[in-house]
Amino acid sequence: MTEYLHFVREYLPYLLGGVPLTLAIWVIALSVGFAIGLGLAWSRVYGGRAAYSIATIYVEIFRGTPVVVQMLFIYLGLPSVGIVFSPFTAAVIAIALNTAAYQAEYFRGSIQSVSPGQMSAAKAQGMTGAQAFRYIVLPQALRRVLPQWSNEAIIELKFTSVAYTIGVIEVTARAYKVGYHTYQFFHIFLLASLIYIVMTTIVSELLWYLEKKVSVPGLGVDVGRPEG
Amino acid sequence: MLSPITASNIWFLIKGLGVALEILAALLTIGFLVGGALAMVQVYAPRKWYIQGPIRVFDRIVRGIPILLLLFTFYFGLSDVLNISPMLASIVALGIRSSAYQAQIFRSALLSVPPGQLSAAKAMGFTRPHAIWTIAIPLAFRYALGPWTNEFSSELKATSLVYVIGVSELTNRASTIISNAGGYILLVFAVTALLYFVVNKTGNSLLYGLEARLRFPGFERAN
Amino acid sequence: MTDVMAATDITKSFGSDQVLRGISMSLKKGETKVLLGPSGSGKSTFLRCINRLTLPDSGRVTLSGVEVTTDNETNMRRRIGFVFQEFNLFMHLTALDNVRVSLVKIKKMPKAEATAKARAVLEKVGLAQKEKSYPAELSGGQQQRVSIARALAMDPELILFDEPTSALDPELTQEVVQVMADLSAEGMTMLVVSHEMGFARAAADELVFMENGVVVETGPPEKLFTAPEAERTRSFLRLLSDGEPAQGPVPTSGARDG
């Protein structure tokens, strides 16, 4: 056991050095994916035939194929048509495009779950479609989607490890390097697993806290009985 | 550059797909059996901390680490002790992972069964296990199908990562073809993606078909 | 004087079902009209055609002489208030915000001014102390009153009420009817679809009885209640009166508290 603790003391800093990269990929990809996903969801709910079809095809492709293939396609494939990305950028793009497809579906569901009466009332007040969506539908849809979105966020955090396959020196890559040099594969991978568990747990708690913070009586949190 | 569009290459890829499907079938089965059992314990067994606690810890751990790391840890961990093939290690590792996800699905499905159903069965004289088997499980199965279809897709895509511990499946073979042919990268990856896509779609269609066949009037999806 | 609202020959079908077969109606400033009729007669559909929440198949609607079309419908709606049967309060906003949001986002009023106006209107419907409550924390009657406040805040030329009390428990309808009666007495132009006979008798200038997509009869309340011309009017009104306890006229009063 003390042997393992020595091992940990020696290599933990190096592993932790990969955390900023992991988080950077994750945050950027998640944000970009959020914007794209929202746009795709809008197209699938309100868009005309062309927008709907394009969005649907996109979602089908990116949800129907593995992340690693998407990443390899972008990093190894695109250079042959002149588009070259660094490993980091390619990883961010791949994960962003991937999460956008999943988020699109979650947003679409939550937008459609907002009662149509809300839209009617907004329009009856004289809001344009855009105003109604932005001030009335979207705030409600986002609150409703949080549980699923949180889930997706954590899934993508774990998928950052796939960036190892195209040479990004994040946590998983570093773990492999240490293993390769020390032959203590099991030890280092155990340590790396622990790091991910801590990361996902912290993120999970933060998102749960966010959920409670934005919840409003009647939306997302159990409300008390209405007064008579 | 040699064109990679040869019959032998295509066959090579398809065999890789076969490997992926083998792993998929095995891991889903493990996940189904173990996950099902875990769900039953979570829903119907006594609420003691020493029973439910370990299950929740298991869930947290297995769902908290990336697939790649799970594969690595498992393979290298077991290799110290047994002489295990990469293929078998993949199946066991992914099977255990899937069981955590399937346990969640089945647990949710079992909890969606209106409690009144089991009360009625009890009132009719069914023993509890018999009632669960005859009434709750068929209903839960129908509720679970939708989410389970997602799990199917998810695990199919997960098999693409097993190459990191040396299994020669579809994605791996695509890379091999590319390095041999020295080019046509986009095409080969596109075809690979297409193969996953087609299998995914087919699996989904079959599962939707099953769902439709099992539907009865008045069936409402949980959620 | 131009009519505040004039509708001419409105028709509407849903699929093969012709719900409105040519309805015409007008309101002068300060008039309160109540639209009555059996379910399915097209009353709500007609109301929704006025502000184009539902698009009529043919016919014409004008607001203060100007036709309401697809091009100007958003602007026109800002001058027409609409109160829904299911309230449709914005769930994620407090009562105050519900009333205030249109002022700030549509009329671009400065926040302080909008807040003052919103509070005044909430006070008017008797819910000033509930301004921080969310719709889910309010009773049905309270929600509907906030909904009326929300419509009032925009200083509409006309308010449309689509069965405002039908979704309410019986003991909660009075608080809403009272607000409506007060509004009517103060001179608001109102078109109300409702079964509330007390309100119709006391506040309506004219009743319009609709059935099967056509106007069967119109006239002042007392006339329709005591000596209607059409037999169908008579039998429908009898049905309504028999089903309810005798409702005396509703006296106008100051604001009630919730």
Image (spheres, coloured by chain):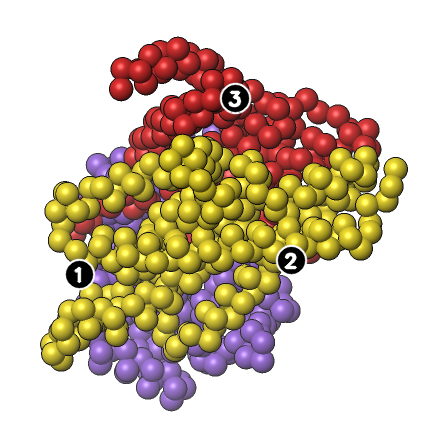
Chain colours: A red, B yellow, C purple
The percent coordinates of residue B57 (x first, y second) are: 26, 38
Mark carried by residue A48: none
Q: Nearer the viewer, mark 2 or mark 1?
A: 2
**Above or below for B147 versus C93:** below
Label 2 with label 3: CB-CB less than 8 Å: no
- Residue receiving disc 1: C171
- Do tag 2 and tag 1 residues touch (Cβ < 8 Å)? no
- How dense is the environment of label 1, judged by Cα within 10 Å: few (below 14), some, or many (20 and up)? few
Q: Which mark is residue A180?
A: 3
C33, A68: nearer the viewer? A68
Q: Residue at horizontal 76%, vertical 38%?
A: B178
Residue drawn at (56%, 56%) of the image: B21
Q: Secondary structure at mark 1?
A: helix
Q: What amino acid is found at the position of numbered circle 2 in the picture?
A: Val
Residue A92 falls in image quadrant: top right
Kindly check if marks 1 and 3 are in contact, taking CB atoms under 8 A apart as contact.
no
Give the image location of residue C23, x and y in percent. Answer: 54, 72
Q: Which residue is mark 2?
A: B198
